[in-house]
Amino acid sequence: RLAGVDTLVLIDSVIGLTPLLSALKTIFNEKDEKSVGGAVLKLNAAELCKLAGVAKSPGGEADRVTMEELTSSTKGFVQKFADAAGALDYLCITDGKYPGYLVEIPQDTAIGSETSFRTWQMPAVDLTTQAKEGMLYPIGAGDTVAAGTLAAWQYLKHCNPGEEFFGVIPPTVGEKLLDVKSEWCKDASCAEEDKGYKMATAFAFGLACGSASCLKQENSVFDVDDEVRFFGGMVKPISQ
């Protein structure tokens, strides 16, 4: 098999989820306290609503997802895909120009009417000024978000002070990642919230990568300086 208990998995497709989640749950059932692996599903709000059978507001995909839609679709998703609990740690949800969301998937499979989901509202990069100055090129931005999120997640999981890191994150950018993670995690009230803010840091980094790629005509290409500028200007995600 290609994955184990220490593998970081980012799923960037909603096709074939049922067998994939089943396989991941089987793998991660073998995790112990020393295991560092995990899995997230990155999708947009419209895809989540469609998977869960939740009707979006009249404006459709052009409108920002509401908290009611987000909660209902997350609950519907977990009920539809029973193996999500045990296979996934989080949903990384994008919503176009609006703030995205990181949603923790509870590991208890008994999802009832009173079930709540720990959620972080992610900061959005305002590209309004850039749009006024020139064209924006959003094609490929979603792929860039996925790649940036996974790269940052890997860095935060495996980079240890004083040790050389073998990955795609350059040292100077990695230092910024660690600084933001420390700042966002410092007031975490429990281990689960601390873990969530670490994942939120990685997702925010990915969102900054995707936003930076909108400035380049070539798909999924961005200037690192733009990404660092966007990421450095992000406010701490709101825990809900």
Image: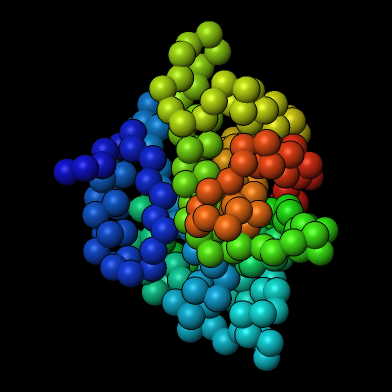
Q: Is residue 104 left or right of 16 when viewed as pictured?
A: right
Q: Nearer the viewer, residue 58 or 24?
A: 58
> Does the image show residue 214?
yes
Residue depicted at x 67% and y 63%: 136
Q: How is the image coloured?
A: rainbow
The x and y percentages for residue 99 are 70, 61
Residue at image position (44%, 77%) is: 51
In-image side of 150 versus 68 (left or right):
left
Q: In the rendered image, which quarter contains the N terminus?
A: top left
181 or 192, nearer to the observer: 181
The image quadrant where one finds the C terminus is bottom right
Which residue lies at the image location 38% right of the left edge and 68% below the top edge?
A: 14
- In the depicted view, which residue is nearer to us: 224 or 216? 216
Residue reaching furthest to the bottom = 58
Dividing the picture into quadrants, the one containing residue 100 is bottom right
Residue lying at the far top in this picture: please name it.
Answer: 162
Tag count: 0
Vertical placement of 47 versus 102: above or below? below
Residue found at the very far left of the displayed protein: 1
Give the answer, above or below, for where 80 lies relative to 106.
Answer: below
- Quarter assignment of residue 54: bottom right
Q: Is residue 90 visible?
A: no
Q: State whether residue 214 is above or below residue 16.
A: above
Q: Position of residue 167 (x, y in %)?
A: 43, 28
Q: Position of residue 94 (x, y in %)?
A: 59, 62
Q: Is residue 170 above or below residue 164?
A: below
Image check: 53 left or right of 27?
right
| Residue displayed at 74% across by 30% down | 183
Spot occupied by residue 58 in the image (x, y as percentages of width and height) = 68, 91
